[in-house]
Amino acid sequence: MLCHSGCVKVLRSPFGYLVGVLVVLTGWVAATMIAAGAWEPVQEANVTPTTEKNADAAGHTLAVYTDIPQPERTIVCTADGPEKDRSTTLPAAKIDVVTEVDGTEWHLVALWPEGRDDVKVACTPKDRKIDNATYSYAVLDGFTSRGQTAQIVAFAGLFAGAAVAGGTYWTRRRMKQEVEP
């Protein structure tokens, strides 16, 4: 009986609710740390110019970068597969992540968690004006799996905290019923 008397004491006390809340918060903090670590491969990526070769990213995350950030313009990136009807508009990056390769800073433009093989990446400004930026891509491992792990940890913390709070409520209710005639 692991932790029988100590756990029962916590569950009998109103502090059991506080312990439940702390378990949930600890799960959220751990999940946040894991999710933040998912961005490491994006920051440490080795980029390949989009003009050099097609990307092979099946089962990986495809990240697209530019050397000239243009926050005032909307840049649209597409991944065109070997079949002419397999063009995909890549989701725009929600945050600016920078990686440095050979002294050049590359800023994240788009991030595609479900990459495909043999895709030609192309980026153009939505306003169709002249664009002097260079675009490159990187194939990343572990980005989506770390995000999924963070979700699992967050839900585990939530359920564990709810179990402690529920156990506290049930134990205190039983104690109250035993005391009352």
Image (cartoon, rainbow, N blue to C red):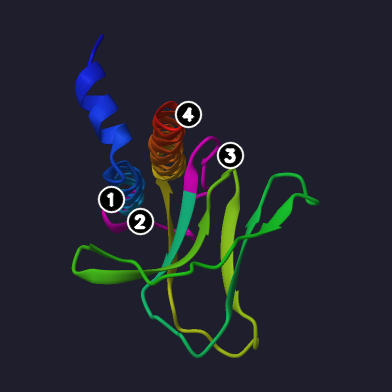
Whole-number angstrom distance, CA of label 3 to CA of label 4: 72 Å
What residue did someone put label 1 on? 33
Circle 1 Cα neighbour tier, 10 Å, few/some/many (<14 / 14–19 / ≥20): few
The residue positioned farthest toward the front in the image shown: 181
The amino acid pointed to by label 4 is: Pro
Which region of the structure is painted magenta? 38-61
**Label 3: element kind:** loop
Of the numbered discs 3 and 4, the one sitting upstream in the chain is: 3
Whole-number angstrom distance, CA of label 3 to CA of label 2: 17 Å
What residue did someone put label 3 on? 117
Q: Is residue 69 magenta?
A: no
Residue 102 location in percent, x, y? 20, 63
Of the numbered discs 1 and 3, the one sitting upstream in the chain is: 1
Whole-number angstrom distance, CA of label 1 to CA of label 4: 50 Å
Relative height, residue 161 to residue 91 (above, below): above
Residue 89 location in percent, x, y? 67, 62
- Residue 181: mark: 4
The amino acid pointed to by label 2 is: Val
